[in-house]
Image (spheres, grey):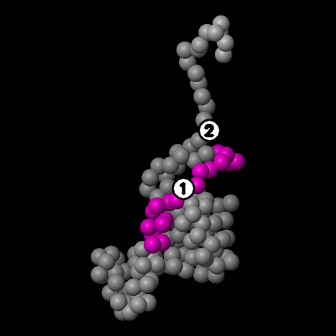
């Protein structure tokens, strides 16, 4: 603007986005094609960390059964077994989650649903299901 141009009183800026619930919290989602900032999903990362920690505790012999470990941790055995399934995820999916590159369709709720243990097919079951 030059000195002779009057400054408008109101400026309207249109930013296309929508608010979605993800992991129990609200998050903004940009339209397709817009550059998405990489952000790790702390809920997924914590779930993976717990699952691998519990697996290590079972494999070390510190606890004889997952039910015994669940009692020690103060959680339901069924919840523990669902969480332990996360240790069966393909390494590239785990890496994508840790790097924040997993995409909006990969949520803890989705990972709690049954999925195949075959790594090649997990991409169809987990990552590409909504595409």
Q: Is residue 34 rendered magenta in the image?
A: yes
Task: Check the picture and name the quadrant holding the N terminus.
Answer: top right
Residue 82's x, y, as percent? 46, 76
Point 55% across, 18% down: residue: 10
Is residue 71 magenta-colored?
no
Residue 3 location, x and y as percent? Answer: 64, 9
Give 84 or 101, whichever is nearer the viewer.
101
- Image quadrant holding the C terminus, namely bottom right
Category of crowding for the residue at label 1, using alpha-carbon neighbours closer than 10 angstroms: few (below 14), some (14–19), many (at least 20): few
**Residue 105 shows in the view:** no
Q: Which residues are magenta?
A: 31-49
Dividing the picture into quadrants, the one containing residue 88 is: bottom right
Q: Is residue 56 left or right of residue 62?
A: right
The label shown at residue 39 is 1
Residue beneath the point at 60% across and 61% down: 101
Rendering coords of residue 72 (x, y %)? 29, 81
Q: In the rendering, which numbered label is found on residue 16?
A: 2
- 38 left or right, relative to 54: right
Q: Residue at x 66, y 71 (%)?
A: 123
Residue at the outermost front position: 3
Name the residue rendered at 31%, 77% in the picture: 73
Q: Which mark is residue 54?
A: none
Is 93 located above or below residue 22 in the figure? below
Q: Is residue 121 left or right of residue 69?
A: right
């Amino acid at each position: 603007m030059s000195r002779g141009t009057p400054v408008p009183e109101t400026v309207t800026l249109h930013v296309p986005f929508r608010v979605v619930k993800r992991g129990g919290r609200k998050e903004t989602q940009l339209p397709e094609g817009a550059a998405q900032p990489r952000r790790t999903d702390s809920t997924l990362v914590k779930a993976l960390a717990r699952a691998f920690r519990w697996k290590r505790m079972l494999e070390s012999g510190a606890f004889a059964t997952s039910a015994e470990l669940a009692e020690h941790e103060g959680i339901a055995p069924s919840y523990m077994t669902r969480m332990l399934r996360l240790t069966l995820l393909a390494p590239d999916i785990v890496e994508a989650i840790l790097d924040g590159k997993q995409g909006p369709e990969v949520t803890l709720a989705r990972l709690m649903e049954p999925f195949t243990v075959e790594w090649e097919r997990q991409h169809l079951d987990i990552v590409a299901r909504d595409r």
